[in-house]
Amino acid sequence: MDEPRDVLEGFAVYRVGGAVRDARLGWPVTDEDWVVVGATPEELTARGFIPVGRDFPVFLHPVTHAEYALARTERKQGHGYTGFVVHASPEVTLEEDLARRDLTINAMAEDPEGHLVDPFQGAEDLDARVLRHVSEAFVEDPLRVLRTARFWARYRDLGFVIAADTKRLMRRLCDSGEIGHLVAERVWQETVKALAEPRPIAYFQALQACGALAVWMPELDADAALDLGEQAMATLPVSDDPAMWRWARLLEALADESREALCERLRVPNAWRELARQVARTRALRQKYDNAGLTGADVMAWFDAIDAWRRSERIAPLQRYLALAAPALSTCVDEAWQAASAIQPRALLEEGYRGKALGEALAQRRLDSIENALRR
Ligand SMILES: Nc1ccn([C@@H]2O[C@H](COP(=O)(O)OP(=O)(O)OP(=O)(O)O)[C@@H](O)[C@H]2O)c(=O)n1
């Protein structure tokens, strides 16, 4: 495609950040970011670039729609993720733009001929498998604690470690209380991304080590909780949403109040909270089955708790979850559900039941059918 070159004629343009890192690592490159040096916002808009940045000058390429940012520096003022003073002007150099970045492996650039610009030895760290901060300015942005933990969750299986000095800065951001100034939505956003990485437990372990877990997820801040969570996240039922299932499995052994407090603090979306509740409830059913054996009333209470009567689509995934550790129970539950869901309120209406009596008769017949199924 010739077009991209034309609209950038005369500007110095570099591929930067994640794309450079992942290409060198042999990791799939999902999106490409570019930095433009020596231009003004007016020049870019005059060539058809679409401004999209609210806090700093970022534009979409008129043809490819890739992101192009003007080279900029950032200084911190105030707490949390807000309060950055951004300076973008044609005088800002590529090196200055790279210097504001979080990790050395994220602070590499490539010119159009593919030559690496790497003032902070990111390539060396990439080869040595080290996540290392670019400079002490790392501490200007507490989100970087979470980002570093997330990158570890992504690359740990390739042998990556977090540099000792970087761990020290992560701890400093927690000890100073700065980590607490993040907004819950940002913490949750990073957590969701981490849950989709190959080794999500590494994210939580890194946050525990620096003290961020104690601030944002104290309910998980115990070795035992993380060990259980790691085991649980290792096996998931087939589903379209492994991240949501990992979250549910990570939380499944927590007490109800702890789980709800954690989800509330992080402003976890309802669908995620709901699955976590259902999985915890289903785990409790399995434990009862393992320890004491199940009665019809237990299974009935479980159907009620997951609202199976109105939301029958919930049964199948939870049954697949049960099948991971307790195939016999899963079959048992399936048979009970087939029997109980075959009982139609309409039939009872035809028999003359109304109002409260109808509800009671329905519940009784469902229970009877479940008990019959369990006896088989
Ligand atoms: N708090 C932040 C956020 C971003 N960056 C820099 O901005 C780049 C782009 O950020 P982003 O798109 O969030 O991350 P990627 O590195 O592209 O990672 P991913 O593969 O997760 O998209 C990063 O490489 C990093 O250099 C940073 O230094 N500090």
Image (cartoon, grey):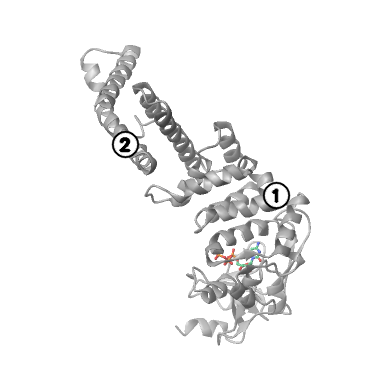
119 with respect to 311 (left or right): right
Residue 364 in the image: state x and y as whole percent. 31, 17
Of labels 2 and 1, earlier in sequence is 1
Can the viewer see residue 230?
A: yes
In percent of the image, x 39 and y 41: which residue is there?
325
Extreme front residue here? 291
Q: Nearer the viewer, residue 269 or 88?
A: 269
The disc at residue 328 is 2
- Which image quadrant shows ligand 1? bottom right
Determine the residue positioned at 70% across, 78% down.
Answer: 95
Q: State the quadrant of the C terminus.
A: top left
Bin the neighbour count of mark 1 within 10 Å (Cα to Cα): few under 14, some 14-19, many 20 and up. many
Pick whichever, 237 or 4, lies toward us.
237
Q: Secondary structure at mark 2?
A: helix
Q: Indicate the position of residue 188 as horizontal and vertical percent values.
A: 58, 49
Q: Residue 97, image x and y in percent?
A: 69, 74
In this rendering, which labeled residue sits more in front, label 2 or label 1? 2
Secondary structure of the residue carrying tag 1 is loop
Seen at 31% across and 20% down, the residue is 367
CA distance for labels 2 and 1: 42 Å
Mark 2 closeness class: few <14, some 14–19, many ≥20 residues within 10 Å: few
| Residue 170, x across and y down, in percent | 71, 57
Q: Please name the amino acid that badge 1 sits on.
A: Gly
Circles 2 and 1: CB distance less than 8 Å? no
Left or right placement of residue 76 versus residue 115 in this view: right
Report the amino acid beneath label 2.
Ala
Question: 371 and 52: which one is in front?
Answer: 371
Which residue in the protein does label 1 denote?
211
